[in-house]
Image (cartoon, rainbow, N blue to C red):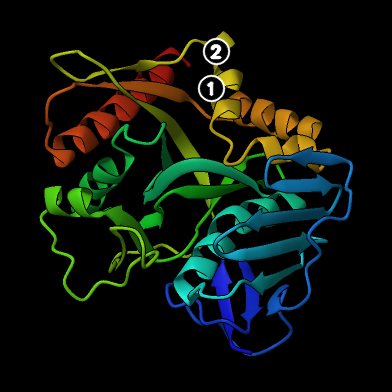
């Protein structure tokens, strides 16, 4: 099986993972392979289409297959008839990857991220808030991407939160691609039944970076962008809200770890809110607002130190 690199570890997969960069041969950290997956094991937590307990997660997608994530080092999938590779891969790199990251104690934050000279900047927000277009603006300013949708977070020896890069491609809906001035010709679909596409990026930073700042992007009816620090009392709740697939934490008995991680992040990392106007704003202008706001806050901290 070929090896791939994602979120700082090596994955061996019997199914091609076309958007992940190839890695050197050797013993993988994680294996993805077809195999038997039970419809249910009666695990301690059961919710809609999934069930879980510590280090074990099973999900069923009725048109695609059943998936088992176990021990932080293996994903087993059972493909249903008529499901194609793209449908299986989208779940492997989405739902299954979120559960795997949690089992490996990597916090998956629903955010895009880029590298600046002073560290990683993360932009989080609900679907439709404009993360993809903002990421396009940041990259247009020459900042290499680290993740397009979910950034992994771990902690260094000194407790510094570190951003872990995902893979060198964006996943964009057709209208977002068009707004960023790109076509869809020749781009592989994330799923054959969706108008969402992978687009490889030239500028990708593959190494972990200390987190410089986190920005909460919020769509509003304002006429102009508004950028300001988030109140200290609201920061932990804000980060916790954007843990990707956060209900999996309860299922795998990781709620305390998730909360402690959010607290540790806000103790070390400044958080800001960018209220985005309802009308169209050029992505580069949003990106400049973010970078200027972060720099101004850092200057103020240095001036009062």
Position in image of residue 269 (x %, y %):
53, 30
Residue at the spot of label 1? 238
Residue 305 falls left or right of residue 141: right
In the structure shown, which secondary structural element does the residue marked by tag 1 occupy?
helix
Position in image of residue 241 (x %, y %):
56, 27
Q: Which mark is residue 5?
A: none
Q: Residue furthest front?
A: 81
Foreground of the two, 196 or 130? 196
Which residue is depicted at the point 48% across and 16% down? 305
Q: Eyeballing the image, is 260 above or below 160?
A: above
- Other residues around mark 2 within 10 Å, as few (<14) / some (14–19) / many (≥20): few
Residue 45 falls left or right of residue 170: right
Which residue is depicted at the point 68% across and 72% down? 78
Which residue is depicted at the point 68% across and 71% down? 77
In the structure shown, which secondary structural element does the residue marked by tag 2 occupy?
helix
Which residue is depicted at the point 50% across and 60% down? 166
- The reply to whether dot 2 and dot 1 touch (C-beta < 8 Å) is yes
Foreground of the two, 91 or 122? 91
Residue at the spot of label 2? 234
Position in image of residue 64 (x %, y %):
56, 65
User: In which quadrant of the rendered image does the N terminus lie?
Assistant: bottom right
Foreground of the two, 236 or 254? 254
Res. 20 visible in picture: no
- Other residues around mark 1 within 10 Å, as few (<14) / some (14–19) / many (≥20): some
Position in image of residue 101 (x %, y %):
67, 54
């Amino acid at each position: 099986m070929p090896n791939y690199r994602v979120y700082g570890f090596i994955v061996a997969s019997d199914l091609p993972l076309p958007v992940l960069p190839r890695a050197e041969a050797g013993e993988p950290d994680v294996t993805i392979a077809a195999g038997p997956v039970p419809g249910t094991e009666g695990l301690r937590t059961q919710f809609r289409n999934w069930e879980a307990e510590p280090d074990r997660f099973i999900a069923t997608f009725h048109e695609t297959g059943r998936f088992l994530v176990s021990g932080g080092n293996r994903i087993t999938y059972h493909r249903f008839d008529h499901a194609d590779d793209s449908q299986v891969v989208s779940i492997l790199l989405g739902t299954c990857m979120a559960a795997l990251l949690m089992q490996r104690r990597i916090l998956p934050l629903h955010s895009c991220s880029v590298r600046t000279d002073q560290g990683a900047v993360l932009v989080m927000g609900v679907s439709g808030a404009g993360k993809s277009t903002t990421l396009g603006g940041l990259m247009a300013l020459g900042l290499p991407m680290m993740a397009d949708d979910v950034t992994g977070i771990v902690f260094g020896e000194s407790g510094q939160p570190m951003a872990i890069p995902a893979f060198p491609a964006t996943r964009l809906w057709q209208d977002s691609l068009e707004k960023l001035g790109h076509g869809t010709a020749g781009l592989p679909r994330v799923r054959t039944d969706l108008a969402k596409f992978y687009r490889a990026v030239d500028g990708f930073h593959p190494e972990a970076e200390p987190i410089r700042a986190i920005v909460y992007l919020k769509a509003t009816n304002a006429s102009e962008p508004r950028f300001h620090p988030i109140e200290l009392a609201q920061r932990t709740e804000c980060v916790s809200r954007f843990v990707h697939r956060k209900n999996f934490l309860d299922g795998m008995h990781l709620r305390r770890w998730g909360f402690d991680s959010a607290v540790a992040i806000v103790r070390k990392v400044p958080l800001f809110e960018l209220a985005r106007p309802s009308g169209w704003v050029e992505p580069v202008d949003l990106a400049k607002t973010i970078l200027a706001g972060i720099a101004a806050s850092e200057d103020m901290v240095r001036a009062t130190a």
